[in-house]
């Protein structure tokens, strides 16, 4: 009997799903503030070390940096002095430096640069750019392009180069980021980490073929692909739409969206393993949030057809706020740190991941972009008192 490809199965399921609508801006904002308030209350000192995974680490590590990407997105739709002060305290605590030294090539250590540059644009305080420039300039001068050997690194570092290129007007940052991106996409591991046939990414060369999931399919990790999608969105936000690099990123972005639309679960989430729903199958919030973020952006920019993709993001958002968000703002179904579907298992409604911060950041990115997409703008005075 001929095997039915998993994507076709997912696609057929998608066609039978009931239509869902996107909540109002007021409802979206209410959930964002609920989840963010929970995190800020649980981490009253943003500069204090974090103990995720049972080990003390400085709080400018990548997991916290992703949270601040989300907080900056929330600040963009709902300016609040608390958010600004919380970010200032975090940056000041680390003297606006990377994790490690100014010579670091590690993308995880550079993730904080995205928020440092956002804050620089709000304040024009040169301290916030000094160490970003020192670090990225050293990377630009180095001819090697293999730093981003795992696909998560694309999100951790690539948008910082894009922001620096726009802010400074120096195209060398853009050239460097695309050289690194192309190496990871097309060369790393022999043939690159991007499978053009499936329009999805292997996490690193350990998961390239002949590695396979139990059902025989390639291993495409949900959050890893979510990192790539988020990176492409954040880079395109910094580039002129007519720039060749924009078009290159857009090509990959749209192909990924088509593949991911067909892989969505019936309940609106995506599995940790995109092509094997039986391998640690179940609801997972971070990958789902990142796909919402990317697709909502694509719809808003006009690169994705609203009729085709709005039901996808609506179904996904409704699933998260219904099944993941606790009454106190804690996020369930967040997979812990790792590199494949087996990491951080079991992932449940009540399970606490080794780090909570990046899960909140992914959720804030998703909801903030949906808020921008939502047409019926609600004036501030009409918001419920508890979200003002």
Image (spheres, helix red, strand yellow):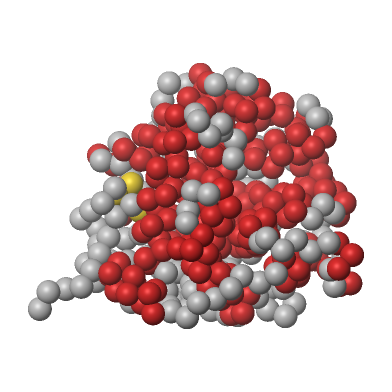
Give how far across and how far down residue 379 sits, in percent: 83, 61
Q: In this view, does 7 lie above or below 141?
A: below
Q: Of 347 and 6, which appears nearest the observer?
A: 6
Residue located 47% across and 80% down the image: 18
Give how far across and how far down residue 221 sits, in percent: 40, 60
Kindly tell me whether residue 332 is visible in this rendering.
no
- Quadrant into which the N terminus falls: bottom left
Q: Is residue 327 left or right of residue 247?
A: right
Q: In this view, does 309 lie above or below 102?
A: below
Q: Of 11 and 115, which appears nearest the observer?
A: 11
Q: In this view, does 260 lie to the left or right of 317?
A: left
Q: Of 131 and 24, which appears nearest the observer?
A: 24
Residue located 40% across and 42% down the image: 251
Residue located 66% across and 22% down the image: 168
Give how far across and how far down residue 381 sits, in percent: 89, 65
Q: Is residue 194 left or right of residue 289?
A: left
Q: Is residue 111 left or right of residue 147?
A: right
Give how far across and how far down residue 380 sits, in percent: 86, 62
Kindly tell me whether residue 97 is visible in this rendering.
yes
Residue located 38% across and 57% down the image: 258
- The part of the image, by quadrant, that contains residue 103 is top right
- Quadrant into which the C terminus falls: bottom right
Q: In this view, does 234 lie above or below 272?
A: above
How many numbered dots are placed on residues in this image? Answer: 0
């Amino acid at each position: 009997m001929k095997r039915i490809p998993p994507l076709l199965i997912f696609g057929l399921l998608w066609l039978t799903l009931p239509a869902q609508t996107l909540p109002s801006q007021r409802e979206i904002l209410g959930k964002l503030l609920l989840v963010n308030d929970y995190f800020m209350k649980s981490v009253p000192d943003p500069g204090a070390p974090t103990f995720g995974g049972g080990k003390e680490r400085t709080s400018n590590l990548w997991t916290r940096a992703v949270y601040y990407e989300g907080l900056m997105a929330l600040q963009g739709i709902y300016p609040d002095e608390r958010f600004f002060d919380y970010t200032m305290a975090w940056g000041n605590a680390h003297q606006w430096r990377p994790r490690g030294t100014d010579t670091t090539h590690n993308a995880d250590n550079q993730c904080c640069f995205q928020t440092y540059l956002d804050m620089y644009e709000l304040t024009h305080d040169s301290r916030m750019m000094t160490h970003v420039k020192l670090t990225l300039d050293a990377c630009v001068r180095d001819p090697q392009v293999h730093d981003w050997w795992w696909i998560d690194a694309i999100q951790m570092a690539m948008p910082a180069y894009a922001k620096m290129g726009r802010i400074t007007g120096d195209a060398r940052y853009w050239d460097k980021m695309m050289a690194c991106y192309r190496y990871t996409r097309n060369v790393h591991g022999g043939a690159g980490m991007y499978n053009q046939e499936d329009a999805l990414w292997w996490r690193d060369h350990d998961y390239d073929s002949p590695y396979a999931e139990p059902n025989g399919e390639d291993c495409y990790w949900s959050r890893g692909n979510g990192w790539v999608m988020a990176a492409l969105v954040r880079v395109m936000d910094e580039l002129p739409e007519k720039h060749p690099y924009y078009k290159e990123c857009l090509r990959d972005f749209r192909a990924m969206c088509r593949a991911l639309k067909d892989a969505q679960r019936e309940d609106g989430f995506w599995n940790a393993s995109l092509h094997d729903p039986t391998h640690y199958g179940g609801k997972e919030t971070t990958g789902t949030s990142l796909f919402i973020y990317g697709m909502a952006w694509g719809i808003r920019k006009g690169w994705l057809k609203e009729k085709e993709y709005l039901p996808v993001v609506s179904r996904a958002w409704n699933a998260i706020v219904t099944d993941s968000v606790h009454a106190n703002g804690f996020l369930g179904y967040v997979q812990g740190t790792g590199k494949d579907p087996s990491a951080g298992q079991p992932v449940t409604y009540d399970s606490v991941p080794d780090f909570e911060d990046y899960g909140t950041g992914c959720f804030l990115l998703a909801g903030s972009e949906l808020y921008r997409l939502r047409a019926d703008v609600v004036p501030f005075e009409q918001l419920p008192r508890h979200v003002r």
